[in-house]
Image (tube, grey):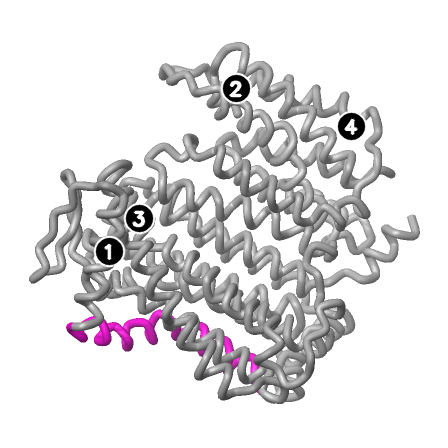
Amino acid sequence: MTTQSASITRFNRLTLMAGLAVAGLVAVIVTYQVMASIECRMTEIETACRALRSMTARGLAILTVLALCFWLRPSAYQSLRGTSQTHPGHGLWLILYGIGLALIFLPLPLFGAAEISQRFMPTLILMSLGGTLAALGALFWITPAGRWWQWLRSEGYFLPIAILGAFIVPDLADLMRPLWNVADLSSLTFFLVFLCLLALGLDVGVDPETYVIGYDDFFVQIASQCSGVEGIALITIFMGLYALLMKDDLHMSRFWLALYPLAVLCSWFFNILRIAILIVIGAEVSPEHALNGFHSYAGWLMFTALALGVIAVAHRWGWLHRTPRDRSTLPRLAEESLAALIVPFVVMMVSGVVASAFWPTPSEAYPFRAVAMLCALLYFRPALIRMLRHPEALSVLVGLAVGALWIVTAPVAVTPQDAPNAVWIALRLLGTIALVPIIEELFFRGYLQNRLMRGGLIWAVVALLLPSLLFGLLHERFVAGMLAGVVFGLLAMRKAGLTNAIAAHGAANALIAIYALIIADWALI
């Protein structure tokens, strides 16, 4: 009871909303750039469509900038966190946030995946309105507008300037695209892509005058949109932000004259590899996935990861800093309980996005996803060992009951399925029985449910239902998934806590996986 009471009194709206924002952004990517890709050329307002699509990249950049600011300025984070605890916003703002999210996803069930491009005007209105309501609800649920204003004044308005810089990253990339027209740069990029493909032993066809390259039946024109300037723009924004935050400790000449050119060069070579991979995907896997999936949003994810890698190198490279870098005092992410609850779930969702971008049948990429999830859990092993305890036997029995109900209510498979190989089956079973239950329960029950537990019956109901609702959205059978989430949430409220939910989820998935293995119906899992 003491631990639970402490978690209630230390309820942190800021970190809860950050987790919801990350999950929401990933859900938007999966929904509108995987499940129902909007083709801007088929809409009546192409410019507005492209602006709407750019919001994914802008949102990703803003969340990354916020994380960097709070990481490098912990005092600002603690100040805002304290403000949200002493002066929280009204609960109605959270309801407004939920309404905004519902409006964002409403076009998919309303118009269908195939008709969204043809019905873009109402889709644009719904998504724009939903995004505005969700943003306002998120901000003012954390703390009222007046308190935001006081906090911004105390921090010197640095954060809104940083957010504005992140928001204009796609526009900065557009301004930098004329660099692609420099003949030496474009010709060298084209030539190096050709060498990459040639090194793979491919029969490459080229037209140097128009920068067309490819093999078999898949050819692309390497234009300014493929130049990779978004990577350079991201590196420039993130390194500029880091330099401002660390200005008293950095050797600026070394930072900009040594690290920045190396980072830009690395980004350029990374883009050459990206174009070569795009061509291989288009020829060997699927042209649609190469052009619509990988080219449109997976590139932003990869360039963001590259830019963060550069910042990590800068932060640990003592030569760039005036004061010696004591590695023993640097925070170790693997030890952070909060990160252990959130990061594995982000890895799981991002791996799903990458699988949809690279594989025509995303389920074929499950071995890659399983390895990514396993690595994430192993990395956070120190924090997880502290966090988890032995489950109650009741949780396993309840989980088996949930699994049995899932099986008996499952629709009958109507299409024959190809038999997967033994490696795929082994990794699928590992992911379904062990990895996914741990990761999903860490996030939905360990993070969301615990953060919403503020004491009192109303908040207990909200803490139980809201994560269960989001949990159901991850499953094709929404109602069944939501009800299973409610059961796991109730078990998490017992003495053994989160471990109960993991054990029940694992037992349910184990029963379903064994049944799917027996009848060879992999759609069940």
Q: Which mark is residue 277?
A: 3
Q: Is disc 4 surrounded by few (<14), some (14 to 19) or many (20+) residues within 10 Å? A: many
Residue 377: percent from the left, percent from the top?
65, 44
Q: Which residues are magenta?
A: 157-183
Residue 143: percent from the left, percent from the top?
67, 72
Gap between marks 1 and 3 measured at Cα: 10 Å
Q: Quadrant of residue 267?
A: bottom left
The first of marks 3 and 4 along the sequence is 3
Q: In percent of the image, x 41 and y 61: which residue is there? A: 303
Instruction: Judge from the rendering whether residue 141 lies leftward or rightward of residue 283; answer left or right.
Output: right
Magenta region includes residue 274: no
Query: Could you tell me the amino acid type at mark 4?
Result: Ser
Residue 218: percent from the left, percent from the top?
17, 43
The first of marks 2 and 3 along the sequence is 3
Q: Quadrant of residue 365?
A: top left
Query: Could you tell me the amino acid type at mark 3?
Result: Ile
Q: Which mark is residue 395?
A: 4
Disc number lying in front (1 or 3):
1
Gap between marks 1 and 2 measured at Cα: 48 Å
Q: Nearer the viewer, residue 462 or 392?
A: 392
Look at mark 2 in the image and give the residue it sits on.
410
Asked if 220 appears above or below 359 in the picture, the reply is below
Q: Is residue 164 among what the camera can see?
A: no
Q: Nearer the viewer, residue 295 or 255?
A: 255
Disc number lying in front (2 or 3):
3
Query: Could you tell me the amino acid type at mark 2?
Result: Ala
Q: Is disc 2 surrounded by few (<14), some (14 to 19) or many (20+) residues within 10 Å? A: few
Farthest right residue?
2
